[in-house]
Amino acid sequence: MRAIPTQRETTSCASDTRGSTRVEATLSGSSLAPGSARALLRKALAEWAQSTADGADLLTGRVGDDAALVASELVTNAVVHAGTEVCLTCRLEEDTGALVVEVADRHPSRPPRDDTAEGPAHGTPEYGRGLRMVAALAESWGVTYRAGSKTVWARLPTREETPADPAAAYAGERAPARDLHAAALLAADPLDPLAPHGRTGPRDGPREGPRDAWRAASYGDDWLARRPGRDGAWLGRGALSFLAEASDLLAGQLDEDLVASLTGQLIVPRLADWCAVWLEDEATAPGGRPGAGGRLARVWHAGEHLVEELSRALEACPPPQSDDPLGTGPVPYPWPRATAAGGGDPHTPASPGHAGGPAAEAADGPAPGEAEGPALTPPGTALAYRLVAGGRPLGTLVIGRGGIDRFPDEITGLVEDLGRRVALAIGAARRYARQATISAVLQRGLLPGAVAEIPGVRSALVHEPCDKGGPSGDFYDLFPAGHGRWCFAVGDVQGKGPEAAVVIGLVRPWLRLLAREGYRVADVLDRLNQLLLDDATEAADAAARALVAAGARPTAPGDGPQTRFLSLLYGELVPFEGGVRCTLASAGHPLPLLLDPEGAVRAVAQPQTLLGVVEDAGYTSETFEMYSGDTLLCVTDGVTERRSGSRQFDDGDGLALALAGCAGMEAGAIADRITRLVHEFGARPPADDMALLVLQAE
């Protein structure tokens, strides 16, 4: 692989910036730079298209796609070969209307790389294709060297320019073949999906002459030339950007059905008239043979009125089992036909060599047993791609296009690349769904299934985990303890996720057991503290024994499992005629606040040590009585420590002030108001779990 010869006196088209619309940005020399460049350029072009600058009205469509691809390729080249930060400049010349894209880096000693030497068909490196693509798209391009920097620029005309002699411009090849040649720069030549294995090429006989001449002659009935909108031109000029944007779009989706829906929108109508996605059950064993096609998750058709009919036809004949269930290459799929009233086969069998093409339809007519209904679209070709990720078959992607006898090799290769991205997105969505299901089941088990109703007391609860995909570190409980007593608890475990879930799973049963055994509030905290310390000691001893048994050195003091501690507000309610008696204690927890009907607020507990920290800590409790209209508010630190810049919600007794404004409101309304105020306090979503319990005497 050698470098393109360049000259120091190369003149940049971008040297004169007078009379131009211009945008400039500096990008980091990382893998994120090409995507940022495309987004910046598209935004600028969209804004310029609304302006009155000469040529601005032509910046959408094909010109915009060309510019985005050129910027992406030039930035990629600079990132890979220079490794410095990249300066992207784009401007619109007012005198000519041309669009100029410049990419500068800080490594002038390295010329841009290109691939002009012959190489193997497989193992094509990632570099060496971009500048050839730029040369195919740009009216002119070049390299400018300056002290300490190098700039590669490309000039793209926005006005349509017709060559004086079209035949001379494309001597020996048709226009569609020229467009397909650009796509050939993006990937190695794929094998023909419909040709039997062992053949030397995808057409009858060996190739003769240059690759482009062979390809131009191979499509005597070239569908790219006949389709409106010049699909071939887009394929050559936008395929790489298409895959990059598709990757960005699919990577952020966490629902497999949404991935299937987006796949249809990406493919139709750009690459096919219709497509369908089957998703297979997760029970399919890794490396095993898939089931009976799975479920038809999504069907997309360029003609929306045909979607329902196409779905019925495809439901009746799922993709067949493959000899290689983990192979992702395309295989022929029978062309669907409308299901006739009274039954019948909804597909036309694919004839060898034509894959159900129009020639076979005309020559042979409907096959025996086939439905006589009309074709859903003009007879054409359909291909099926297995969706495989992590050695596990996840489904099948089927595409079809009418009026052709076969898909061009560039299309099959592009869809296969897209299929790999779709499979990865589906696999990621399924992993997320499994994790979310496990977390939801675990979260339900860590919280009470029902909240006890206390005579003479209204209650309201709010529980909002920060991470919707994992168990919360905050918990609550409200349960009967027998003998006319009810107990409540609001706690916050150190950390989040599975480790916090383990502690909650230990504490809640212990709380209920100790309360129902008749222990007083302070005694319950004493025993919980000792139980947490004992559990941590046992875990450390077990880990040390496992290390010694495995032949490892024992851990140094402080390096083993850490003590698991939590803050807890625990109390006991005893109703009496006209009110309720409350006894509670706070162990390292935000202090509870009592609101009276006149709006006065006061704290009703003393701060004490966290549970699970000090072995001989002694806990005390406070007792008070609540009468009609009195309200007790218990929260976790997700409320008091809610941040807005450097400020916290409870700074300057913010929580007490918020509660004072709730005088005269019922328990549910108070909980809603406090929750709303906490959310509105900061511009960003809360960064911590939040639990809130309101108890109000009737």
Image: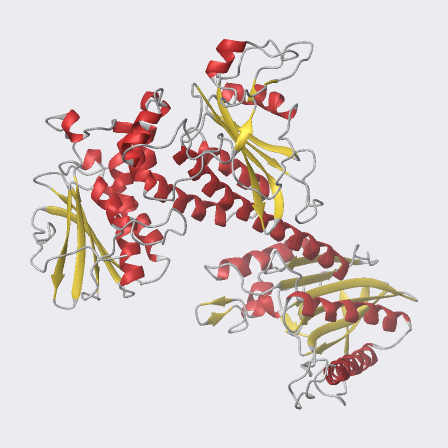
Q: Position of residue 424 (x, y in %)?
A: 54, 48
Report the colour scheme. secondary structure
* Residue at the image position 17 percent from the left and 51 percent from the top: 153
Does residue 441 sit above or below 653 in this rendering?
above
Front residue of 417 and 654: 417
Front residue of 13 and 624: 13
Image quarter where the C terminus lies is: bottom right
Residue 415 visible in the shown view: yes
Image side of residue 495 versus residue 110, left or right:
right
Does residue 424 sit above or below 483 in this rendering?
above
Image quarter where the N terminus lies is: bottom left
Residue 698 visible in the shown view: no
Res 296 → quadrant: top right
Image side of residue 622 versus residue 303, left or right:
right
Front residue of 68 and 501: 68
Q: Position of residue 103 (x, y in %)?
A: 22, 55
Front residue of 323 and 529: 323
* Residue at the image position 82 percent from the left and 62 percent from the top: 479
Q: Position of residue 693 (x, y in %)?
A: 69, 62
Does residue 97 sit above or below 651 in this rendering?
above
Q: Position of residue 381 (x, y in %)?
A: 49, 23
What is the number of callouts on the image? 0
* Residue at the image position 78 percent from the left and 79 percent from the top: 535
Image side of residue 65 versus residue 149, left or right:
right
Does residue 81 sit above or below 264 in this rendering?
below
